[in-house]
Structures are given as structure tokens and as C-alpha cells.
Image: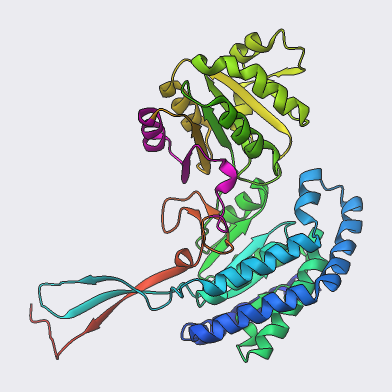
Amino acid sequence: MNTDQITELVVKIAKRARAASLELASLSTDRKNRFLEDLADRLVSETDAILVANSLDLQAAQTLDLSGPMTERLTFTPERIAAMAEGVRQVATLPDPVGIEIERLSPPRGFDLRKIRVPIGVIGIIYESRPNVTIDCAILCLKSGNAAILRGGKEAFHTNMKLAELIQETLQANDIHEDAVQFIPTTDRWALNALLKQDDTIHCIIPRGGESLIRFTVENSRIPVIKHYTGVCSVYIDAAADPDMAERLVINAKCQRPSVCNAAENLIMHQDAAAQLPRLAKALHERGVELRVDKHAKALLSGSGLPLVDADAEDFATEYTDLIISIAVVPDTKTAIELINANTSGHTEAIVTEDAAAADKFLTEVDAAAVFHNASTRFSDGFEFGLGAEIGISTDRLHARGPMGLNELCSYKYVIHGTGDIREN
């Protein structure tokens, strides 16, 4: 297809999505939940077919020269498909946000004024590599009464197309508007350019992927964008940290799945806890983690025999999405907070301590969408928060912040019930 044909295709998809969104706004909770349960069953029953499609993408990944973390995000297994289906079922059990009364106001005139939660309308989701996003976004948008337009990356095209096919089959089987969820069936970059110009029919864009994709989206979109650029997350080990807990949390935050945005990229140690550093560094090294150290950490580890890389200032602001961690030793909690706030992407930060005052200071003064005390940064996730799947994580400050579930995919409207009230001044 040439650029004119692609633009025409995207415009038609957007217009159909807008028409579908007007029907979805009043779709009953029972019908939404039946769709979700049927989709979960279909994902499990079609596991083999999904894996076949995914294998085509994994074969192509070798020619695309994808990084290890990108390939890991792309890969489906029966276990991951089962977990994805469980996420769909969990969303079915969640309260329907549409029509919920957020607030009842008392205006001077005395009439009945309420703020009611309603769908945003049409949401465009742009993403790379991770095909589970196709399902996560489709189900959250539908449950919250929104139409979804999905634009996945070329590296997951076959898997995404198979998942989109299953979604379409399930919509039809449940007599729900077939344009409620649409997948743009081309990997041509022009489709993204065209999508970002449809501000008369699309109400929100959510990009999920690397920083370059997100910045391109923000710079070229006429439509409001909800996003986070990077996930630069830190774990701070306070002077009063329990050593066993500190090791367990650091290893989990860095190593459990280093390719994701809630993995820890920085380890910050209070100088009075620095005796723990050789132990932590050894445990990280044994798991294949490259250690990038500031001068204070380097001095403490100089006799350890561990391979060390000198860290520069930029390292503490870098999202590695790999088995690499930057390590700093600081004199106090105040300095730790300053270091984090200077480098954070606003995603997730954690403190390990048994000192309640230090924890309160950290949780209050660190500027991030999520702050944790004695818990791994890996919990910054919609599923772990009980939101079901998540459509993304926002580090913005308006409308939504942190993992975005059903409530964050809604806006609101004011509803007045009057008795013939008129305004006379």
C-alpha cells in the first residue's frame, strides 16, 4: 500500500472505532464479562496456534537483530499464555467503572448534581515487541467502555494478528460491535503518522515501548498522550535495613526479569549499611549482573575480586533493561533522596529499612508514581496491584499516574437532575 492508501485505511478504522465507542458506552456489565470469560477460554484452547504464530516472529527476530531483552519480551510460552488468560479472567471479576458516581455536589441552587465516571471514548495504543499488550489493552478498553485501536510492532506482527483474530471471533460470538477492538494490519511506519493525526475521532494515545518510540509519538501527535519515557528505578538500602531482606529484594528487583520497566537499575547504599555491599555485589555478580560503581562503592569493593566498571553520572539516569546495575554509597537518607530525584524517571523507587522515620521521609520526599517500603520494585504492575491487566504505566501528573487500570481509562461527566430550575442572573 502507498501512503494515501494507508492513510485512508487508518481514517476508516478510526471512524469505525468512534461509532463503536458510542455503543460500548452503554454496554452492560454482564455482556462485557461474558466476552472476557469467553476470550480467556479461547486463549487457552488456541495456545498451540498462538505459539505457532509466535514462532514465526521469533524466527524473524534473528534477522531483525533484536536485543536479548526485546526477544525475551516477544517470547510466548504456554505458561505466559495461561497467565495472560488469568489476567483476562481477573478483569472480568473487577467492578465495572462505567456509571459509578464519583462525587455528589451541593451547588447553591440546590439541584441534584453528580460527577459520573464515563469512558474516554476511543483509545489508540502503540507498542513494540510484547504481544501480550494486544490482549491487555483490548480487555481493559472494552471493560471500561472504550473502543481500542491497536498498532503493534513489526517484530510481533504474526502473534498480534493471531491474537486480534481471536478477539474478533470472541466479539462476534458475543454480539458486540466488531469495531470495538481493531488492529492496524500493516507494519508500515506511515500508519503511525496517520494514526496520530486523527484527533477528531481518537481521544487518547498510549505508547508502550522504547524511549524513541514514545518521544516520536509525543512530538508528532495531535491527540493527548499518556506515557512514561523510561523506567529508571532505584532500591535504597538504609542504615537500618535487614541484610537478608535487602539481598532478597535487590536480587528480585534486578534479576527476576531485567528487561521490564519496573526492574531496578540503581542500588544506593547508606554508608552505615555499606558493610553489606560486598555481600550484595557478590550475589548480583553470581547472577551475571555487571556492576557499575561510584568511587565510594569502588573503594569498598576494591579487595573483593569482583569485576567493576566505573560509573559516571549518566549511568544513574540510564534504563538498562539488562543485567547491569549502577551502585552508589551515600552519607545519609537525604543524599539518597536527592540522588534519586535527580535521576528518576518517575516510575518506581524503593527503600529497605526497619526505621519507620526513614521510611516515611523517603516515601514522602521521593518524587515518583510509586514508592515502596520493604518491597521489590517489580510489584509496580497493574496485575500485582489488583487492577487485572494494565494498559500501561504513566509518569505523567495529569489524569493518570502509575499503573493504569479500568478507572484510569475513564473520564467523567457532570449530571444534573433538576425540577425546572432556571438561571436568572
Name the residue rendered at 73%, 12% in the picture: 304
User: Which image quadrant is residue 277 in?
Assistant: top right
Name the residue rendered at 50%, 86% in the picture: 27
Q: In which quarter of the image is the N terminus?
A: bottom right
Name the residue rendered at 56%, 80% in the picture: 33
User: Which image quadrant is residue 163 in?
Assistant: bottom right
Q: In which quarter of the image is the C terminus?
A: bottom left
- Magenta includes 382? yes
Residue closest to the eye, 41 or 117:
41
Residue furthest to the left? 425
Residue closest to the eye, 201 or 361:
361
Residue closest to the eye, 36 or 391:
36
Q: What stretch is highlighted in magenta?
A: 356-384
User: Above or below — where is 213 with respect to 1?
Assistant: above
Residue closest to the eye, 364 or 316:
364
Where residue 172 sits: x, y (%)?
A: 68, 89
Residue 15 appears in the picture as rendered = no
Name the residue rendered at 60%, 65% in the picture: 196
Where residue 141 sits: x, y (%)?
A: 56, 72
Residue 228 appears in the picture as rendered = yes
User: Above or below — where is 410 with respect to 323?
Assistant: below
Apparent side of residue 403 relative to residue 216 in the rendered image (left or right): left
